[in-house]
Amino acid sequence: MRSRAGTAPGDRVYRIHWVPGTDTLRGICHCGAERLAEDPIELWEWLLAHPQGHQGLTVPVPGPPRRLAMRE
Amino acid sequence: MAFARNQWYVAAYGSEVGRDLLARTVLGEPLVLYRTGAGKAVALADRCVHRRFPLSESRLDGDTIVCGYHGFTYDPTGACVFVPGQQRIPRTARVVSFPVVEQDSFIWVWIGDLDRADPATIPRAPWLADPRYAVVRGMAPLNARYGLLVDNLLDLSHETYLHGGYIGTPEVANTPITTEVDEDRGIVYVSRHMDDAECPPFYARSTGIQGRITRWQDIEYHPPCLYLLHSRIAPQGVHPPAEGEDSEAFHAEIVYAITPSTEHTTYDFWAVARDFAIDDESVSEYLHHSNHTVVMQDVTALNILEQVIATEPDRYQELSINIDTGGLAARRLLARMVESGTVGATR
């Protein structure tokens, strides 16, 4: 994303996508490493630990959608 | 709660600052604001150095403030230029003059280290002073810590529950978000794109759209103070063209300035700038009334929340879920700014 107020993007952008139809979050580091999680705190911790534990990590597209709300 | 001191904060709208003295407290610092005869906005410490009388309770004489208690007189730089009954003005007779920048209809002030005040770092909200937009605005004092308003604005799923009948519809809470943190620029982005959504009254009445809509919410938070919500409303299925103007859609730029007043109070500056019906005063009146209502719903909820938090033990364990991804990112950037005093500092 780019700021509409005119700010150019920086080199270090962390992204978390909530995978549609699931409860899963996909974290993407600026280094290209990716990880799936269901806890945003855990996922931010992993992203911000860059480069620790990020080497060569990519993940497959998650499976079929689950119910929107689920008790575990 | 600590503040990020070396940052710019909105103290007032430019329209609030004139030839009357205005009192505001920012980051616990009492300020008096006024405008010189030449039109320049000034922010001085709001306490006479003599016996601490508030200068905001005093009077202007030209560009100087004459203390209403004993007559100590201060110029716009904060220097004392007159004391009663004697010729010698003590060397320490001076109040702090805080750096001020008037931009995008806001009066920004800098409370931190004076040598670090760089106006180029103030984030922009250009729609608020753009004749192609019609703007409604207001300010609501909040009896709650500023972090609660940041949490509130970074997670708009609450619209469905707290603002139903105004801006909330079921799709807001049910639509997944994308969150980005630009670590170098210190900006948090949260996007929620609803392809097929109910049109809430706020937009149905202001745009005239009947039926379902494609509704995009793109948040851009420039901590600590400026929050932008780019709201795009279009008839369902209408997306921006690959090139050219997005003329089939209605755009509202919703701007908040979140300014800590004290540890437990906050100034909630809010504005809605729109690029449609800009000459229709009835739309302005409706949007002002509706958004004020929405803001006051937040104020009521956050004031309650502040009382709850203030009376509970420290380190109460919250529960965070997917909707909180953006709010968690904002909290981290704010904590880093409190710690270091800068955005984008190398970790």
Image: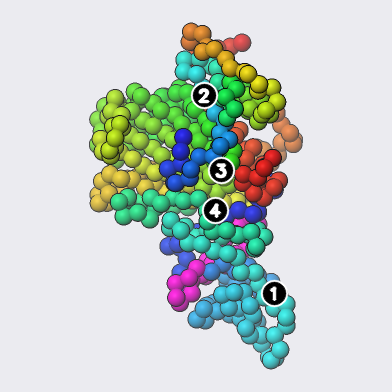
Pointer 1 residue: B49
The answer to whether dots 3 and 2 both sit on one chain is no
Q: Are marks 4 and 1 in contact (CB under 8 Å)?
A: no
Taking the spot 61% from the left edge, 46% from the top edge, the residue there is B343
Residue shown at 73%/33% (left/top)? Answer: B315
Q: Secondary structure at mark 2?
A: strand
Q: Which residue is mark 3?
A: B185
Amino acid type, residue under disc 4 in the picture: Thr
- Tag 4 and tag 2 share a subunit: no
Which amino acid type is shown beneath numbered disc 2?
Answer: His
**Magenta stretch, residue numbers:** B21-41
> Cα distance, mark 4 to mark 2?
29 Å
Q: Few, some or many C-alpha atoms within 10 Å of disc 1 (few <14, some 14-19, many ≥20)?
A: some
Residue at 60%, 59% in the rendered image: B117
> Can residue B161 be seen in the rendering of this structure?
no
Q: Which residue is painted at 51% across and 22% down in the image?
A: A18
Q: Which residue is mark 4?
A: B121
